[in-house]
Amino acid sequence: QVQPIESGGGLVQPGGSLTLSCTASGQTVSMRGMGWFRQAPGKERELVAGIISGSRNTYYSDSLLGRATISRDDWKNTLLLHMSNLEPEDTAIYYCAVSKELFSRNAYFSEADVAWWGQGTQVTVSS
């Protein structure tokens, strides 16, 4: 069993930056894709950034493309998401997720493909 634990959420002003961190405990996830989903009030949860095993491929949603960088450290079982130029529309609960599939080449995966979820961390962008 794997337990992803997120940290780094909080309140940030528009135009500011934030880095989310996720550490997966229980067993190594180095052979699995990982990603960040978010759910804004009244909206469905969506994948906003994903990264495959070995970090050779990444995915970004249109909403974050150019404003975010996803990275992972497989020695530490850690996933990061650095976001900049944040907008009020980025306000959401951000969830760390670990994919069911081993050694996938596709950095995009859906909720149905998630093996383990973190508990979520709130990001609020407001002045």
Image (cartoon, helix red, strand yellow):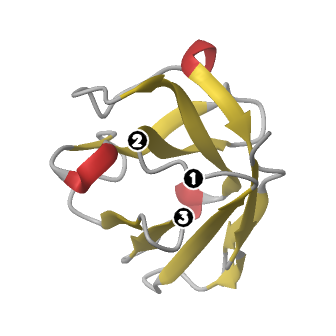
In the picture, the quarter occupied by the C terminus is bottom right
Which mark is on residue 31?
Answer: 2
Q: Label 2 is placed on what type of residue? A: Met
Point 77% across, 31% down: residue: 42
Earlier in the chain: of badge 2 and badge 3, it is 2
- The quarter holding residue 111 reads top right
Point 48% across, 45% down: residue: 35
Q: Is 77 in front, or is 46?
A: 77
Q: Which residue is mark 3?
A: 77
In this rendering, the answer to whether 62 lies above or below 26 is above
Label 2 SS = loop
Residue contact at pointers 3 and 1, CB within 8 angstroms = yes
In the picture, the quarter occupied by the N terminus is top right
**How many other residues sit within 10 Å of disc 3, few (<14), some (14-19) or many (≥20)?**
some
Residue 40 x/y as whole percent: 69, 43
Earlier in the chain: of badge 3 and badge 1, it is 1
Of circles 3 and 1, the one toward us is 1
- The quarter holding residue 61 reads top left
Label 1 SS = loop
Q: Tell me the distance, in whole angstroms, between the alpha carbons under discs 2 and 3.
A: 10 Å
Q: Label 3 is placed on what type of residue? A: Asn
In this rendering, the answer to whether 51 lies above or below 7 is above
Residue contact at pointers 1 and 2, CB within 8 angstroms = yes
Residue 87 x/y as whole percent: 48, 67
